[in-house]
Amino acid sequence: MTVVGKIHSVESCGTVDGPGIRFVIFTQGCPLRCLYCHNPDCRNLADGKEVTVDELMEEIQKYRSYMRFSGGGVTVSGGEPLLQPEFVTEIFRRCQQLGIHTALDTSGYADLQTAKSVLKYVDLVLLDIKSFAPETYLKVTHVPLSPTLEIAEYLSEIKKPTWIRFVLVPNLTDDPQNIEGLAKFAAMLHNVDKVEVLPFHKMGEYKWEQLGYEYQLKDTQPPTPEMVKTTQDIFRKHGLKVQ
């Protein structure tokens, strides 16, 4: 059976979306409307390029030696990959058949039962938790926080290796109580290998302008190194490995 999906693009030798050198697939479509999104052109599922899993696997196999020697693999990111569960599941299933490490980069905003079908074929989850304060999460993403926390707790229950990602945005997600709450939550989970504190940047701002979207964070500056370290220290205080 030919499985077809919509992608935005691929990156053949990525180094920031999981361990080692990775073939990264950016899927099309996302239910979130994050204020700092650097891929706003991934929003609409109707856009993007239609591809088959067979076509992707043919391309992936060209890079197997890089993956093998670096301890890398394939990461499916987005957009939100869980919007296309059958497509993403088939990519991961085929990768695992070939012994290729699989990673899912997700916001966790999805129906849990839908996510479970994909997670069976995932070796590592990169879980983006944008905020722990529900009102801040809603302001950042325009969707509620609860589905993400539900998936986080399920990942802990099944002991699926997980990296938690948190974007530090001055005057938005940097409230110490917000960070403390997320750190306490992450520390209660039994599967978190590390936390990545990602400094806010504006590299995608030009895309917003090209698409005619209003970029509300144009006056926001990236966090200082001191702010990043203070945030990292809060997570470390709770016994979490931090990058």
Image (spheres, helix red, strand yellow):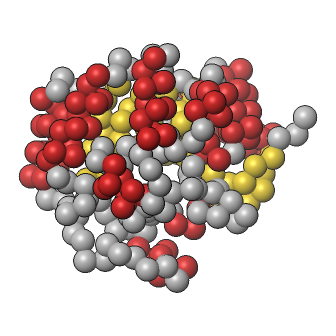
Does residue 156 appear to the left or right of 88 in the view shown? left
Task: Determine the residue positioned at 48% across, 45% down.
Answer: 107
What residue do we see at 74% from left, 33% from top? 90
* Number of disc labels: 0
- The residue nearer to you, when weighing 169 against 124, is 169
User: Which corner quadrant of the image does residue 119 belong to?
Assistant: top right
Looking at the picture, does residue 239 appear above or below residue 89? Answer: above
Q: Residue at x 14, y 47 (%)?
A: 176
Depth check: give the residue in front, 159 or 26: 159
Q: Is residue 164 visible?
A: yes
Give the percent coordinates (x, y) of residue 57.
74, 38
Quadrant where the N terminus sits is top right
Where on the picture, by quarter, is residue 92? top right
Name the side, left or right, on which 44 lies relative to 73: right
Q: Is residue 57 visible?
A: no
Drawn side of residue 207 relative to residue 111, left or right: left
Residue 233 location (% of width, % of height): 12, 37
| Residue 5, horizontal then vertical, whole percent | 75, 49
Residue in the foreground of this view, choosing between 171 and 177: 177
Which residue is situated farthest in the right direction here? Answer: 1
Residue drawn 57% across the image and 67% down it: 41
Quadrant containing the C terminus is top left
User: Which of the 4 image quarters holds residue 94?
Assistant: top right
